[in-house]
Amino acid sequence: MGDPLILTLCGEVDIAVTEPLRATWYLVAERAEHEMIDVDLCEVTFMDACGLGLLVGMLNRQERHGGQLRLRGTPAPVTRLLPLTGLQEVFPVAEWLPDAAKPRPL
């Protein structure tokens, strides 16, 4: 397996953030070019249902072609939200981000 594609979310992740990203991120997952996509959440301060919807949509698209999606550096606001929505068992979590890994903008 090659290096994962790392996508980054930061700040308040709500409809204003997710709507502009949705089409591009979904296309990335649908192309099946990356066996593993990691979503770095280290700097997320808030996430609502729209943010969770983006993550679930990415996971579904990755799984269609046998790929995987992991969350990295889940902050307290997301860590509290996952069990409330029943998604804590759905998303694998990678707590560390290698120093050499650089997020790539889309």
Image (spheres, rainbow, N blue to C red):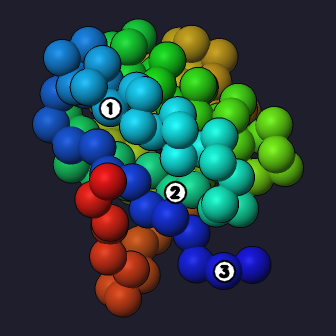
**Residue 21 numbered tag:** 1
Which amino acid, by three-letter code, is at mark 1? Leu
Dot 3 surroundings within 10 Å: few (below 14), some, or many (20 or more)?
few
Residue underneath mark 2 = 38
The answer to whether residue 91 of the structure is visible from this angle is no
Return the residue nearer the eye: 36 or 89: 36
Q: Please tell me whether mark 3 sits on a helix, a strand or a loop.
A: loop
**Residue type marked 3:** Gly
Q: Position of residue 18 (x, y in %)?
A: 31, 24
Separation of marks 3 and 2 at Cα, in angstroms:
12 Å
Disc 3 or 2, which lies upstream in sequence?
Answer: 3
- What kind of residue is marked 2? Asp
Q: Residue 78's x, y, as percent?
A: 39, 31
Element type where label 2 sits in the image: strand
Mark 2 vs 1, N-terminal side: 1
Residue 50, above or below 44: above
Give the vertical position of 39 relative to 59 (above or below).
below
| Residue 14: percent from left, percent from top | 25, 17
Q: Are marks 2 and 1 in contact (CB under 8 Å)?
A: no
Provide the residue designation for mark 3: 2
Contact flag, marks 1 and 3 (Cβ < 8 Å): no
Residue at horizontal 53%, vertical 47%? 28
Q: Mark 1 Cα within 10 Å, few/some/many (few <14, many 20+)?
A: some
SS at circle 1 = helix
Residue at image position (58%, 78%) is: 3
Q: Quadrant of the image for the N terminus?
A: bottom right
Q: Residue shown at 53%/38% (left/top)?
A: 27
Q: CA distance from mark 2 to mark 1?
A: 15 Å
Q: Is residue 73 above or below residue 5?
A: above
